[in-house]
Image (cartoon, rainbow, N blue to C red):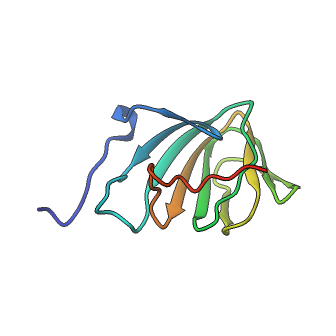
Amino acid sequence: MKNWRFVQMDEVSPVRCPCGQSRRAFVSPDNKVATLHMVDIAGDSRPHYHKRLSEIYFILEGTGYMELDGEKIPVKPMTSVFINPGCRHRAVGKLRVVNIPIPAFDPENKDEWFD
């Protein structure tokens, strides 16, 4: 087995998520460290939180804001946000973001919670 992994993100099929459409890389039972998601934010993104995951958001395209525990923070390309477990959050605007969940996102135990 190789000691590295490779994914061509534009060839990953998108799936629906609370923020819009997500292309998820490195999601596998043997990877517990981190995953990488490229997300196209939808107009109806839902505020949610995680009990165990931290997330890093990196804005690739567009402008808008991150709603973090009710506070609105303007974002644009090259903005990065670190979100701790328990922080209610969502991205708002026509955005494309990279999201890195730590530990790795588990599709069987999504750790996505809504009020």
Q: Quadrant of residue 56?
A: bottom right
In the figure, is residue 12 to the left or right of 98?
Answer: left
Asked if residue 28 is positioned above or below residue 64 in the image, the reply reads below
Q: Nearer the viewer, residue 28 or 43?
A: 28
Q: What's the residue at 38%, 40% (across, down)?
A: 9
Q: Count of labels shown?
A: 0
- Left or right of 100 in this view: 26: left
- Residue 62 lies, in percent from the top left, at 68, 38
Q: Position of residue 83 (x, y in %)?
A: 67, 65
Residue sitting farthest toward the left:
1
- In the image, residue 110 sits, relative to residue 82, either above or below, namely above
Image quarter of residue 32: bottom left
Residue 96 x, y percent position in the rendering: 60, 39
Front in this rendered view, residue 57 or 51: 51
Which residue corresponds to the image point at 70% horizontal and 33% vertical from the top-left? 94
Residue at the extreme right of the image, as rendered: 71
Is 69 drawn above or below residue 114 in the view shown?
A: below
Quadrant where the N terminus is found in the figure: bottom left
Q: Residue at x 66, y 68 (%)?
A: 85
- x then y, percent, for residue 30: 28, 62
